[in-house]
Structure formats: C-alpha cells, structure tokens
Image (spheres, rainbow, N blue to C red):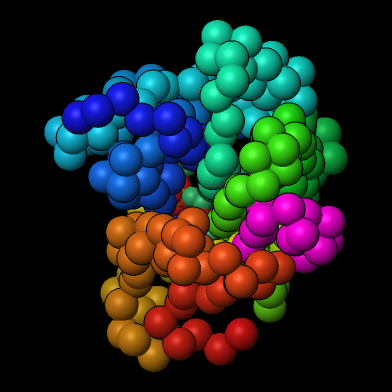
C-alpha cells in the first residue's frame, strides 16, 4: 500500500472498541497510532490486524491519565514526524470500577473515584489539547469521544464512571463550539453494553432481557458509527452525543 499522510490516534486501541476502530481506520488508509497503557502484546495484535488489512500504524504506549506521559509521548511523536498532522483522535481509553458510593473507601490509593475519572476525563484533555493546533491550522479535524449510557442517565454503582463520562459529554459540547469554524468536529458516542473485556464480568444472559434489541452490542458496530463521524459526510454534525444502545431508555 502507498505510504499515507493521514494520521489517526486511538487511545486504548489495544483491545475492545478501540481495536475495532483502529482496524477500520487502517482499512480507510489512515496510519494508525495505537495507544495502550500496559498490554503491548494486544497492541501488537491490533497492529497485525491493521497490516493484514493492507494498512499500517504503530503502537504508542502512554497512560492517558498522566498529563506528563501524554504530553511527552505526543511531543516525541510530533518531533519525529515533522509536518505530519494527526487529524483524527478517538478518545476511547477508559476503565470502570463499580461500587456503591457508601463503599468507596477513601484510604485506597488512588481512591476509586479519581482512578476511574482520570483515564476518561483527564485523558480527553491530555490527549486532545496537544493535537488541536495542528487540526486548526489544517482546517480539518475529527475528535470522537467514547462515553457511555451511564454518563447520560447514570447507573447505580457508577457514580465515579458516570461522572467521568458526563464530564466528557459536557466538554464535547463546549469544545465543539470553540472549533467548528475551523472544520474540526467534536462528537461523543454513548454505547450501552458492548461485548468486550470490560463487560466480561457481567451476566449477559440476564441483562439482555432489559435490552429491547435483546443482545449486547458488538465492538465493530460502535466502530462503524465512529467511522461515520470521522467521514467527510459527517462534516455538519458536531457537539452531538450519539447513543448506540439497542433501545435502552436514556
Ligand atoms: P476494554 O476492552 O477494557 O479496553 C480498554 C482499553 O483502554 C485497553 O486498550 C486499555 O489498554 C486502554 N486503557 C485503559 N486505561 C488506559 C490508560 N490510562 N491509558 C491508556 N490506555 C488505557 O474496554 P472497552 O469495553 O473496549 O471500552 C472502551 C471505551 O468504551 C471505554 O472508554 C469505556 O468506558 C467505553 N464504554 C464501554 C462499554 C462496554 O460495554 N464495553 C459501554 C460504554 C462505554 P491496555 O490494553 O494496555 O490495558
């Protein structure tokens, strides 16, 4: 395949939803930066999948929750690729650690609330901020934030996770208005239950009775939605939160 000059960064690209988005971006001719926190072997599997589909990319290890790590990794990449612009960023990295608030022990370090909020909310800021200028100068950019049904309606046991995703939803709407004139769109995708490692501990057979579609979502279905938001055809969609939840009431 000819060398591409279109670059995309997907945080948490080593597994689950992020991996599927990486594969589809690679298939569309993007050079994909596959970010991960600790799972190098899974990031390599994502890269192999991209290459098998005729695309290319590279793994980029850093903890999105750390401002220092994110800034250093992105700055090093930019220095090594002078003139290159990462025109797509998918802020997908996230974790959950469900617990009723009355059991959130403050003595655990880091406490269960900031530990869950940081990868999503701080991660959005840490990764997006250093990439914005390039998009604005190029007058084209796509920022897609993976949030959650929980960030819209809240779910019991997820005060931490709902706060993280609700924060990203609000930031999506604010940033969209800052950059719309420069051809940069900022949208959020709010999945319901998706079949990934994150939901491996959930009793799917029981839970799907509550889902009108009668099943969990596949990661590839979320990736298809992300790819539409990234496409030229979605140029006039910005500041939106698009649910993909099989009909679960929001
Ligand atoms: P997953 O299978 O557990 O994968 C999580 C990914 O995030 C991994 O690639 C992981 O990297 C990465 N990651 C976690 N913390 C990170 C950090 N601090 N820095 C960099 N990377 C980090 O999760 P998933 O189900 O695909 O979820 C992806 C996103 O969708 C998350 O934001 C999640 O909240 C959201 N979401 C998921 C569901 C669902 O039902 N699955 C529903 C709604 C929203 P390593 O491999 O290195 O650990």
Q: Where is residue 74 in the image (x, y as percent from the top left)?
A: 63, 21
Q: Position of residue 62 (x, y in %)?
A: 58, 21
Q: In this view, does 239 lie above or below 46?
A: below
Q: In this view, does 133 lie above or below 80?
A: below
Range shown magenta: 173-187
Is residue 177 shown left or right of residue 58? right
Is residue 208 shown left or right of residue 1? right
Can residue 9 be spotted in the picture?
yes
Residue at the location (64% across, 31% down)? 64
Q: In this view, does 165 lie above or below 130?
A: below
Can residue 190 be spotted in the picture?
no
Task: Give the camera-side residue of 22 and 118.
Answer: 22
Residue 163: quarter of image: bottom right
Q: Where is residue 223 in the image (x, y as percent from the top left)?
A: 38, 58
Q: Where is residue 94 in the image (x, y as percent from the top left)?
A: 58, 45
Q: Is residue 38 above or below residue 236?
A: above
Which quadrant of the rendered structure holds the C terminus?
bottom right
Task: Give the camera-side residue of 157 and 192.
Answer: 192
Q: Main secondary structure of the magenta part?
A: helix
Residue at the location (45% across, 87% down)? 247
Task: Give the camera-side residue of 12 and 141.
Answer: 141
Residue furthest out toward the left: 52
Q: Does 225 appear in magenta?
A: no
Residue at the location (20% across, 29% down)? 1
Residue 161: quarter of image: bottom right
Q: Does 174 appear in magenta?
A: yes
Is residue 165 shown left or right of residue 12? right
């Amino acid at each position: 395949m000819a060398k591409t000059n279109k670059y995309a960064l997907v945080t948490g690209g080593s597994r689950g939803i992020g991996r599927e988005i990486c594969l589809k971006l690679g298939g569309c001719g993007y050079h994909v930066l596959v970010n991960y926190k600790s799972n190098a072997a899974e990031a390599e599997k994502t890269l192999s999948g991209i290459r098998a589909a005729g695309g290319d990319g590279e793994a980029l290890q850093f903890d999105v929750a750390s401002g220092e790590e994110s800034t250093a990794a992105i700055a090093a990449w930019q220095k090594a690729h002078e003139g290159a612009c990462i025109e797509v960023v998918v802020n997908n990295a996230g974790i959950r650690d469900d617990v009723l608030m009355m059991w959130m022990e403050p003595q655990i370090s880091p406490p269960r609330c900031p530990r869950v909020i940081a990868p999503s909310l701080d991660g959005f800021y840490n990764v997006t901020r250093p990439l914005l200028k390039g998009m604005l100068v190029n007058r084209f950019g796509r920022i897609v934030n993976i949030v959650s049904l929980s960030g819209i309606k809240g779910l019991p046991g997820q005060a931490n996770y709902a706060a993280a995703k609700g924060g990203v939803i609000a930031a999506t709407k604010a940033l969209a208005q800052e950059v719309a004139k420069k051809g940069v769109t900022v949208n959020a995708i709010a999945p319901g239950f998706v079949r990934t490692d994150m939901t491996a501990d959930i009793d799917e057979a029981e839970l799907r009775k509550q889902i009108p579609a009668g099943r969990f979502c596949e990661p590839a279905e979320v990736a298809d939605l992300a790819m539409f938001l990234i496409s030229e055809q979605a140029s006039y969609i910005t500041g939106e939160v698009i649910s993909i939840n099989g009909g679960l009431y929001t």
